[in-house]
Image (cartoon, rainbow, N blue to C red):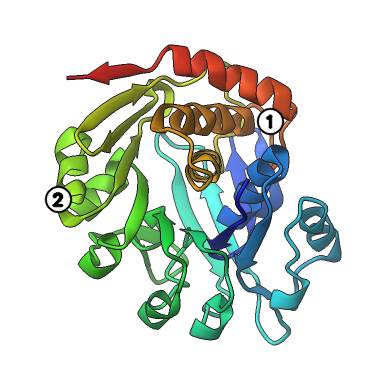
Amino acid sequence: MEPIAVVGHVAIDRIITRGGERRQLGGPPTYVSLITDLLGVSLMAATKVGGDFPDVYASELAARGLDVRGSVVPSAETTRFVLDYTGTERGLGYESLCAPIEPGDVAGLPDAAILAPIVQEIPVETLHALGSRVLALDPQGFVRRLEPGGSISLRPWRNPALLRRLSVFKASERELRLVAGAGGWEGLGRLAGLGVVVAVETRGVEGARILSGGQRLVVPAHVGEAVDTTGAGDAFIAGFFAEYASGEDLEWCGAVASAAASAVVETVGPSIKIGKRELLERAEKIRDGIRRLA
């Protein structure tokens, strides 16, 4: 399979649930590396971590093919996120933010890359410098706004020049509305009108919608127990884009993406308990349930 890159911050997450608190590795590159390692895809990352980043976390990422030792900024703190699951909707906050990803950090990346900001760490100048031709975007970090006191709110965001470059766009329904001004097929259609080749809306237990070249696909979610939903979207785009960059058809890309997301939510923290064979068997079953709409 073709090598891919991911651009975005590795983070340390503080997870708050009704059962207590824990800290764990987080950030899009962490969850992308889970899936690329499982699928046997080589991964590079343009990321930054601070001098406070624990060696045990660096070793954990290195074991999955993601080496962040060359991305340490000794004078900075690692991005630290707070994810609060005690309410009806997930609450987001931050404790610290690492240095931004600069234009020089994206030099020499593979031809296929996932843009996966966690919160405003990819400046416009870096987007201009990115030379990868086959681009995927998860806009979650672009639609987040930092508020005083460490909270995070959401805001509308649109960068037509970047959207026109995209091969794949993936967002939740809420994020899609913030980017396109509408959710569902209407929102996906607006992105297609801007030049996005494949537009995807993830819908949790209801699966995902995919629009590309007039094709409309509804991809089911795998039915299983959700233990920890953190990182599900990152796993989804990793599975989708790893297959897409290797030339697979949209149905298979969507099936692998759905299987990858389901595998991540079945465990606590950034880990997966199933192997590659079971993941692909799960994807085969999901593909059998994909619906093509007229």
Q: Residue at x 57, y 70 (%)?
A: 109
Q: Which element is circle 2 on?
A: helix
- Give the left or right position of residue 37, taking residue 245 as reference: right
* Badge 1 density bin: few <14, some 14–19, many ≥20, Cα 10 Å: some
In depth, the one of 212 and 70 nearer the eye is 212
- Give the left or right position of residue 137, taking residue 210 as reference: right
Report if the CB atoms under discs 2 and 1 are less than 8 Å apart.
no
Q: Which circle's residue, 2 or 1, is located before the other in the chain? A: 2
Q: Mark 1 is on which residue type?
A: Thr
**Image quadrant of residue 82?**
bottom right
Q: At which x and y percent is residue 76? A: 65, 82
Q: What is the number of the mark on residue 267?
A: 1
Q: Is residue 107 visible?
A: yes
Q: Residue at x 55, y 44 (%)?
A: 242
Q: Mark 2 is on which residue type?
A: Gly
The residue identified by callout 2 is 193
- Give the left or right position of residue 236, taking residue 127 as reference: right
Q: Residue at x 46, y 53 (%)?
A: 92
- Give the left or right position of residue 258, taking residue 19 as reference: left
Q: Residue furthest front?
A: 247
